[in-house]
């Protein structure tokens, strides 16, 4: 199984609070593949905790955009190192802008033998109550994010651009459970690689 996974890049994306980190961690545990999250492993360690409301100032918004662009560059540089070593990797990041999609496409262009498995976490239920629940869960897990209110969620989600690279969409909202969403993602990966299902 490990040989089949060597030249694979799994990308789990979606707007903030869509469950992409949870899905990516579940895949990582099930397949024993390293997982890098743009907020947890790149942005916060390098640039610090994001400002709570950068939209109140054009200067802060510009700084926020610059930090995110730099974070994507670092994330994809790390991915390139893994691909050069023929090691599988899971990335979780919003990939909300077309420029980020283009950066990913350029990376894949350098590694034509690498299989991309792109999973778009797309909750169909993002009512105010559901977003409040997800924000509270994030606070309890000490997960700092640039999205920390319903207003900020709506603002960032409105900038999200549909992914043009081949992908699947997974609904990550109730009545689906986290286990359901992770299972759907794993089936997609295993079917694409003709790997036998387990358990």
Image (cartoon, helix red, strand yellow):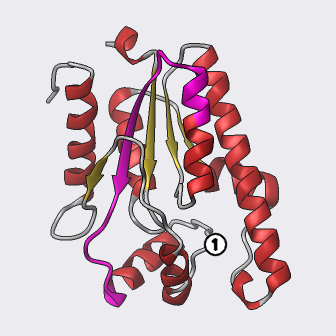
Magenta span contains residue 35: no
Q: Position of residue 55 (x, y in %)?
A: 70, 85
Q: Position of residue 140 (x, y in %)?
A: 50, 72
Magenta span contains residue 121: yes
Q: Quadrant of the C terminus?
A: top left
Viewed as shown, does residue 109 lie left or right of 196? right
Viewed as shown, does residue 106 lie left or right of 30? right
Residue nearest the viewer, comparing 69 with 86: 69
Viewed as shown, does residue 83 lie left or right of 16? right
Q: Residue at x 36, y 53 (%)?
A: 120
Viewed as shown, does residue 3 lie left or right of 65? left
Q: Position of residue 66 (x, y in %)?
A: 79, 62
Residue nearest the viewer, comparing 35 with 16: 16
Q: Residue at x 54, y 29 (%)?
A: 108
Near mark 1 (Cα within 10 A), the count class, few <14, some 14-19 or many ≥20, is: some
Give above or below for 61 relative to 27: below
In the rendered image, the residue lying farthest to the top is 3
Give above or below for 30 relative to 100: above
Q: Residue at x 41, y 27 (%)?
A: 32
Residue nearest the viewer, comparing 122 with 186: 122
Give above or below for 3 relative to 124: above
Residue nearest the viewer, comparing 199 with 73: 73
Q: Quadrant of the N terminus?
A: top left
- Which stretch did the figure color magenta? 106-129
Asked where in the image residue 63 lies, by quadrant, the reply is bottom right
Q: How many marks?
A: 1
Residue beneath disc 1: 146
Q: Secondary structure at mark 1?
A: loop
Asked where in the image residue 174 lies, by quadrant, the reply is bottom left
């Amino acid at each position: 199984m490990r040989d089949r996974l060597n030249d694979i890049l799994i990308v789990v994306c979606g707007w903030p609070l869509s469950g992409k980190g949870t899905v990516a961690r579940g895949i990582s545990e099930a397949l024993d593949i390293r997982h890098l999250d743009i907020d947890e492993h790149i942005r916060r360690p390098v640039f610090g905790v994001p400002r709570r409301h950068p939209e109140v100032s054009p200067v802060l918004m510009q700084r926020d955009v610059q930090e995110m662009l730099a974070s994507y560059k670092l994330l994809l540089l790390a991915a390139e190192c893994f691909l050069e070593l023929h090691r599988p990797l899971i990335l979780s990041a919003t990939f909300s802008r077309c420029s980020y999609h283009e950066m990913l496409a350029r990376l894949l262009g350098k590694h034509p033998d690498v299989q991309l498995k792109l999973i778009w976490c797309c909750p169909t239920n993002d009512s105010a109550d559901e977003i409040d629940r997800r924000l509270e869960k994030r606070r309890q897990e000490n997960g700092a994010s640039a999205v920390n209110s319903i207003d900020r969620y709506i603002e960032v989600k409105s900038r999200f651009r549909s992914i043009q690279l081949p992908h699947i969409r997974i609904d990550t909202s109730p009545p689906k459970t986290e286990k359901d969403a992770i299972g759907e993602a794993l089936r997609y990966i295993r079917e694409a690689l003709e790997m036998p299902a387990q358990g």
